[in-house]
Image (cartoon, helix red, strand yellow):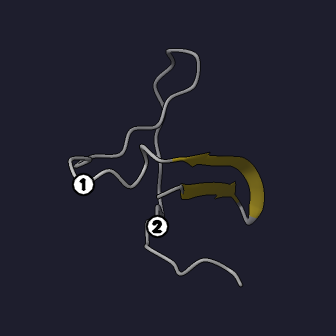
Amino acid sequence: MRATLRASIDGKPVAFLQSPGIAHPTKSKVEFGCMGKDGFFDDLKIWKAEPLK
């Protein structure tokens, strides 16, 4: 199974990744990082969506 991850900031796409490891049954957390720096998020949304056909 090849899962897709997409990220956007203020409605603008900033990242896209396809990998079988994203949807692995043992995955239990999500982490965000950028070159070893800390950051803060507000209004963060994560959901499972059906693929586009």
Is there a contact, CB below 8 Å, between mark 1 and mark 2? no
Q: Which structural element holds mark 1?
A: loop
x, y percentage for residue 6? 63, 57
The total of numbered circles placed on residues is 2
| Residue drawn at (46%, 61%) of the image | 44
Q: Which structural element holds mark 2?
A: loop
Q: Residue furthest top?
A: 36
Residue 38 sits above or below residue 31 on the image: above
Quadrant of the drawing holding the C terminus: bottom right
Query: Which residue does the numbered mark 2 point to in the structure image?
Result: 45
Q: Nearer the viewer, residue 34 or 24?
A: 24
Residue 5 sits above or below residue 40 on the image: below
Please state if 2 lies on the left or on the right of 52 as rendered: left
Tell me the tag on residue 25: 1
Give me the C-alpha separation between circle 1 and circle 2: 21 Å
Q: Earlier in the sequence, mark 1 or mark 2?
A: 1
Q: Residue furthest front?
A: 1
x, y percentage for residue 4? 57, 57
Name the kind of residue labelled 1 in the image.
Answer: Pro
| Residue drawn at (27%, 46%) of the image | 29
Tell me the tag on residue 53: none
x, y percentage for residue 12? 79, 60
Q: Nearer the viewer, residue 5 or 42?
A: 5
x, y percentage for residue 43? 48, 64
Q: Nearer the viewer, residue 22 or 12?
A: 22
* Displayed quadrant of residue 34: top right
Q: Nearer the viewer, residue 36 or 51?
A: 51
| Residue drawn at (20%, 47%) of the image | 26
| Residue drawn at (38%, 55%) of the image | 23
Name the kind of residue labelled 2 in the image.
Answer: Lys
